[in-house]
Every structure is written in C-alpha cells, then in structure tokens.
Image (tube, helix red, strand yellow):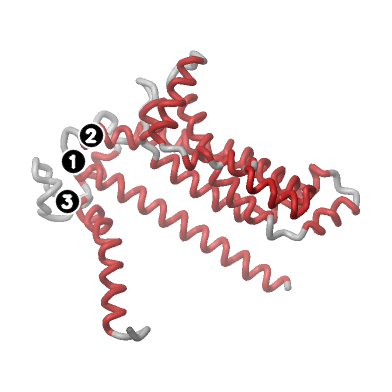
Amino acid sequence: MKKNSAWSNLYIAAIMLLLYLPILVVVLFSFNSNTGRTAAMTFEGFSTYWYKELFDPVTGYGTQLKSSLQVALWSVLVACVLGTLGAVAMVRKEIKQGLKQKLFSGVLGTGEQLAMLPMMIPELILGISFMALFNMLKIPFGKLTLVLAHITFCVPYILVTVKSRLLTIDPSLLEAARDLGASPFKALITVTLPLVAPAILSGALLAFAMSMDDFVISFFVSGAQTTTLPLKIYSSVKVGVTPKVNAMCTVMLGAAFLLVGGGQLISAAAERKKEEGA
C-alpha cells in the first residue's frame, strides 16, 4: 500500500472516526434540549439546560467535583515531592554503584520496581488492601483516606517521568555546582529542579488525570460524607443516564484540552527562549 494512497487515507479516517465519534456524541448530547425520559437517546435540539442543572446545589455535581479536585490537588502535590525526591535518590545511587552493579540490581529488583507496584497491582486488590489497612489503623473513612490512597498510585507516574529526565542530565552539571560552593540542597534547588521541571509537570498532569478518573480505589476508601465525582456519576447512571453526565464529561474534556494546550504553549515559549539565548 502506498504511503499517500486513497486506501491509506481512508484507513486513517476510519481509525480517527472510531476514536473520536463516541466523544463527539457525548458532546452533542450534552446540549440536548430534551428533558424527558428519552433525553439520553433522542436529540431534539440545542440547549444549555443540562449545564445549568450540572451545578444545581441539590441535584448537581458541583459538590462532588469540588471534592475530587481537592483530593487530586493534594494527592498530586504530595506525590510530586515524594516522586521527585525518590527519583533523585535512585539516580544518585545508581551513579555511585556504577554500571555493573546497576545491571545486577536490575535483575534482582530495584527500588524503582518496588515503587511501581501500585501501578501493576489490580485496583480491586489495592482498594481492598487500603480498606483493611485503614480499618486496622482505625482511620475514619473520608477525605484523608482518599488522599492517602491516591498519593500511593500517583507517586509512580511522577517518579518514572522524573527519573527518565534525570538520566539524560549530565552529572558534571551538579559537580560544577558543588565545586562552586553550592550545598547539596542548593544544587538540588538551583540546578536539578529547573532541569526536571517539565518532567515533574508532565507526571503531575498524568497523576492528576488518574486521580480525577479513579473509581475502584475511591469506592473502598471514601466515607459517607465524602463522595468523588466518579462515585456520584456511577450512582446516577444506575438509575438512568441523563445528558447531565454528558455535560460534566464535556466540561472535563474542555479542561483537559485547555491544560494540554497551555502546556504546549509553555513548552513552545521555553524552546523559543532557549533558541534566542543560544
């Protein structure tokens, strides 16, 4: 098949249609003016009715969205600190050990592999484990248990991205900073962190998305007074899907596009500044 043949273009169009058609349907039905029982199946016209219902104090999702944002922000903030420090420590240890010891430890299992366990363990098992742990420690289920659980699976995303970035940095830069009189902490703040900032941001955005999207673990560790957005949507869907769910998905989709677009603009501006400086 030729690279620019009609069949290849048709194939790409079909793949794109399969990927994005469900999203377009969700966006379309979020503007449905139908408020009856068939609102999720019959499109009658354009209206912003469901967006007004979305943040209704009684039947809306505003409270649950606020809870999800608070849990995600606190989880990502703590995970950024733990993941970044963990990545720095792992890279420094591997540099000191040398290549042979690094390869040897990679066979037996490294700290990075242990840190990755929350990503590899099924969410159902992880959720039950957290529930049992918090019960044993007699920690009341609520926002605190949600944040603690979300931190656990957010850390690996940041640790992996930051460590990958650190491995590409020339160690002589840190040595030069130390030779010029910088303490280890000052070298970390003034040299390492600025260089890995894009990786931290990338990992944080991914961890934030995972936290906002989590249902299984949150189901086991949430309290009666704390409900996240995925839990609220699941309970709403059980009694019937309304375009209010579509409206919430559209809002979150728009926020994701804005975040990605903003990140791209910031990266492009940084690249231009770097080129001008060079």
* Disc on res. 241: 1
Q: Earlier in the sequence, mark 1 or mark 3?
A: 3
Q: Amino acid at mark 1?
A: Val
Residue 5 drawn above or below residue 87: below
Disc 1, disc 2: CB below 8 Å?
Answer: yes
Q: Amino acid at mark 3?
A: Asn
Residue that numbered label 2 is attached to: 236
Q: Residues within 10 Å of mark 3 (few under 14, many from 20)?
A: many
Disc 1, disc 3: CB below 8 Å?
Answer: no
* Disc on res. 170: none
Q: Amino acid at mark 2?
A: Ser
Q: Nearer the viewer, residue 235 or 137?
A: 137
| x and y percentages locating residue 157 in the rendered image | 54, 46
Q: Image quadrant for the C terminus?
A: bottom right
Camera-nearest label, 3 or 2: 2
Q: Nearer the viewer, residue 55 or 104?
A: 104
Disc 3, disc 2: CB below 8 Å?
Answer: no
Q: Earlier in the sequence, mark 3 or mark 2?
A: 3
CA distance for labels 3 and 2: 18 Å
CA distance for labels 1 and 2: 7 Å
- Taking the spot 25% from the left edge, 47% from the top edge, the residue there is 246
- Taking the spot 75% from the left edge, 45% from the top edge, the residue there is 93
Q: Earlier in the sequence, mark 1 or mark 2?
A: 2
Q: Nearer the viewer, residue 23 or 258?
A: 23
| x and y percentages locating residue 264 in the rendered image | 51, 62
* Disc on res. 32: 3
Confirm whether residue 73 shows in the render. no
Residue 210 drawn above or below residue 276: above
Q: Residues within 10 Å of mark 1 (few under 14, many from 20)?
A: some
| x and y percentages locating residue 79 in the rendered image | 57, 38
Camera-nearest label, 1 or 3: 1
**Tag 3, which secondary structure?**
loop
